Amino acid sequence: MGRGHQKDGIDVPSLEMVKWFDSNYHYVKPTFQDNQTFNLVETPKVVSDFLEAKEAGIKTRPVIVGPVTFLHLGKADREQSVDPIDLLENLLPVYEQLLAKLKEAGADTVQIDEPVLVFDLPAKSKNAFKPAYEKFASLGAKIPNLVLTTYFGDIVHNLEALPKDIHGVHVDLVRNPEQLDTVVGALGPKTILSAGVVDGRNIWKTNFKRAIETVEAAIQKLGKDRVIAATSSSLIHTPHTLASEKKLDPEIADWFSFASEKAVEIATIAKAVTEGPAAVREQLEANAKSMQARATSSRTNDPKVKERQAKITEQDYKRKNEFPARIEQQQKKLNLPLFPTTTIGSFPQTKEIRGYRNKLTKGEITAEQYDKYIEKEIQDNVKIQEELGLDVFVHGEPERNDMVQFFGERLDGYAFTTHAWVQSYGSRCVRPPIIVGDISRPAPMTVKESKYAVSVSSKPMKGMLTGPVTCLRWSFPRDDVHQSVQAEQLGLALRDEVVDLEKAGIDVIQIDEPALREGLPLRSGEERTKYLDWAVKAFRLSASGVEDATQIHSHFCYSEFQDFFYAIAALDADVLSIENSKSDAKLLKVFVDEAYPRHIGPGVYDIHSPRVPSEQEIKDRIAEMLQHLKPEQLWIDPDCGLKTRQWKETKEALTNMVNAAKAFRAQY
Ligand code: GLN
Ligand code: ZN
């Protein structure tokens, strides 16, 4: 379902993959048919996992996604019209069976995740909680106790949906500590509160004083028997253990706490509130000392960066002229055909490339040898693009381990880990760098490779950068200064890079912001407006230092931006490429409705799967797009970078893409 299937005459595109709330973790969107039915598999994984742990002598609390969240996050399949939430009645019997099986296997308590409670919910989804949880309550001892779990936001606006007759409710008190009183007031008479006081989304040591105060406030109201201390969310979003980090500077390592350490923190907090602070005096003292050391360290504060931030003017956010004047100059310089073709930046990161990088890290080859190898890769990539007949080339990003880590390693203010991997989806992991202090760029980061690429290319070469918001979102950010401050610092650092690329003869520069959407606060309203304001400003700061003739592109994965379209338009990028192939082309209507004047390349095929789209399929997509967009606006490109793909399918797909573009060019 996740990868699609193309074999033996069967050709099924993969299901849509989206981000889990505002995290960088992905899931496959549940996709439903009209009259969808549900069946429980013989041995559900959650049951066999529970038994496996039990046999090893560990009694666990299984975690399942709740029925309302499962349906609310789903969608009707193409050409189907079902509203997923209407399927609740069909779905509930399967939950009953599953919960009974877990009980039979020996589970006393089950965590049932209903994080959609943090959203602004439509009435239908909100009203679905009552029948679902009344049903579960009616099953009594046939099923385990349930802890309804929410995270990444507050649930104050959805309290009516909270079941009264439930064993426990979990809330995120790291993000929204202020919801404590209100939620406690809305609990059923016997319901337990699970207080999420250790951050499941970041790597900073917990401030014990603050966390203990919060748990104690809950105990005051509910009594010791009705409060659980917990992490704010799943620890899937944090790396495993600090113990593996042998190379981390001890000064900095003292500020961190990864998943294992966070588990110990929970135990310490629990001990402090049950046995009194004296029982954990040593830990509390050490913790207070770390907090103090971090706040006053010279590694967190750089006066030069602050000084530059203070000098930013309105002009720094603006290109010299408006788009019509810019595009004319750009076109003179680039001379592109109608429906220009390009890719999003990366080409397959082969085993060989990763092998070379490994050897460099281990010191088995010199930096010069590595650079020579990268140059050869770039040269090959250019040659392949020439053969494919693409119009705007990329160097292929062979030198980049990851689109954020690479920049983090070249910026001051960052710390890196060696083993701190976090799952992104399936077997794919990322190793987010950590922002520890004020950020600045000590030297150019990408100019060498881009300049080389220009020197071997016959066509316009696009330089690739990761934008300020994405650098921020895909790093572990600081929790001691506002994210807008960190984004602004990144914007300034990237601005210098953009200007240097222009000086080096790179006429097209793409600033990727795939994480801008992911960072959007989960609820509409003031918080969202504020976020978009600083996010757009950080982008514009990075992009606006160039001449009109330099073409600025930006790229977004996931194009569901109907509700904040104005911000996408406000980026003022000359060309936007957006992931679109799995969404509905109708979504592009917003560009028409809002009279979007600039250029757009909605992705014409999905890159998450090895499946090769046929030329006809791509033509159909382009035809659909042309119902909404003007021909002179439209670029033809894949959904995203191709680093996770193999060369074979990449070449086949791009050949079909270029041919499809040529066919349309001939018609116009
Ligand atoms: N330039 C990046 C690449 O092609 C963009 C990746 C992304 O948007 N996730 O890999
Ligand atoms: Zn992308």
Image (cartoon, helix red, strand yellow):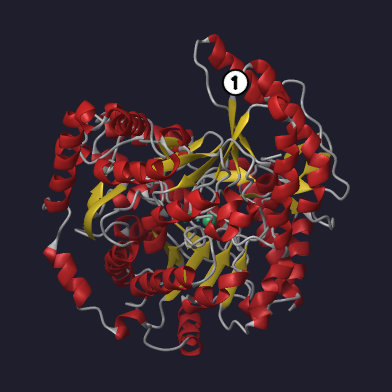
Callout 1: few (<14), some (14-19), or many (20+) C-alpha neighbours within 10 Å?
A: few
Quarter containing the C terminus: bottom right
Left/right placement of residue 445 relative to residue 520 reads left
Looking at the image, which residue is at 51% across and 52% down?
A: 185
The percent coordinates of residue 14 (x first, y second) are: 71, 45
Q: Nearer the viewer, residue 317 or 346?
A: 317
- Can residue 158 be seen in the rendering of this structure? yes
The percent coordinates of residue 52 (x first, y second) are: 58, 14
Give above or below for 222 relative to 653: above
Say how many tags the image has: 1
Location of residue 65 (image quadrant): top right
Looking at the image, which residue is at 54% across and 46% down?
A: 150
Q: Nearer the viewer, residue 256 or 144?
A: 144
Give above or below for 568 relative to 135: below
Looking at the image, which residue is at 33% across and 64% down?
A: 487
- Can residue 199 be seen in the rendering of this structure? no
The percent coordinates of residue 91 (x first, y second) are: 79, 40
Identity, as a three-letter code, of the amino acid under mark 1: Asp
Left/right placement of residue 621 relative to residue 464 reads right
Looking at the image, which residue is at 14% across and 47% down?
A: 292
The percent coordinates of residue 397 (x first, y second) are: 42, 51
Residue designated by label 1: 49
Q: Nearer the viewer, residue 468 or 296?
A: 296
In the structure shown, which secondary structural element does the residue marked by tag 1 occupy? helix
Quarter containing the N terminus: top right
